[in-house]
Image (tube, grey):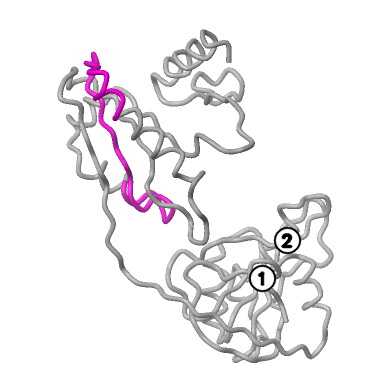
Amino acid sequence: GYVYNTDFATLDYSGSDDVTALVQQVNDNVLPPTATSTSTAGCETADFNGFVPGSIALIQRGSCSLAQKVANAATAGAAAAIIFNEGNPGDLERNDLFFGTVSAPAAIPAISVSFELGSTLANTAGLQVHIVTNTLSEIRNTANVIANTAGGRSDRVVVVGAHLDSVPGAAGINDNGSGTAGILEIAVQMAKLKIKPVNKVRFAFWGAEEVGLLGSAHYVSLLSKKQIQRIALNLNFDMIGSPNFGRFVYDGDGSDTGTAGPNGSANIESVFNRYFAKQKL
């Protein structure tokens, strides 16, 4: 047997079923891959020409979304889909087991495997595989927590945000317990020290970030154009502490990466750099 989250992973929004069937490769799997090759396998309905309904589709990662590959497999009558990594030589990210999402509830089980396992499955004639997924996709409610300082200029609001949720299966202490704990402590200390900010500070604890920035997107969608104009800047604290930390500052002015942030980002970078320099950090 194979070990969950070691040999294979269930893709987010996978369908739920118990399937035993023959494995069949789809067209356009690139085997063996090269260092620069990419695969369009499963991206087009034509990739399933000759596919036997009821089989398990073996599809190489690459090019189009996992959602598109799995949807095309389901349309072709696949009982399940196995997506294996691309396998570009020398690229661990394209060889190891990977995790991903099919973006919306799928009609069939969908799992991911490493390139090595996928290649083994592809090269084993007459292979029958047993796949069991036990998944639940449903609508759930979440919430943002928003708090404003009593004082400060309301036409130059400083938004300080962090997301409340973590990815499924993770403790969340780094992503994003570190961010939420960090800004909560700032809020506590501002109140304790009776700090009166020049500009109004808005603490935003976002819900449902990991499933598509849903909390923050919802909040912004409710703001009027005038309310948006009154926001001077946004500080997003996502993963600000870990055991193997580094003291880095985002490249707001684009001097290191060639890509500057929105207007004002250079000023934010400058404030952080001056602070850390003053602390000799």
What is the magenta range?
188-215
Q: The residue tagged with tag 2: helix, strand or loop?
A: loop
What residue is rendered at 19% in x and 20% in y?
155
Q: Nearer the viewer, residue 51 or 237?
A: 237
Up-down: is 218 above or below 27? above
Report the amino acid beneath label 2.
Glu
What residue is rendered at 82% in x and 87% in y?
125
Q: The residue tagged with tag 1: helix, strand or loop?
A: strand
Q: Which mark is residue 86?
A: 2
Whole-percent x, y for residue 186 in the image: 34, 27
Whole-percent x, y for residue 281 in the image: 58, 15
- 261 sits left or right of 225 in the view: right
From this viewpoint, which residue is outermost toward the top? 278
The answer to whether residue 267 is magenta is: no
Q: Earlier in the sequence, mark 1 or mark 2?
A: 1
Quarter of the image holding residue 187?
top left
Quarter of the image holding residue 85?
bottom right
The residue that disc 1 covers is 8
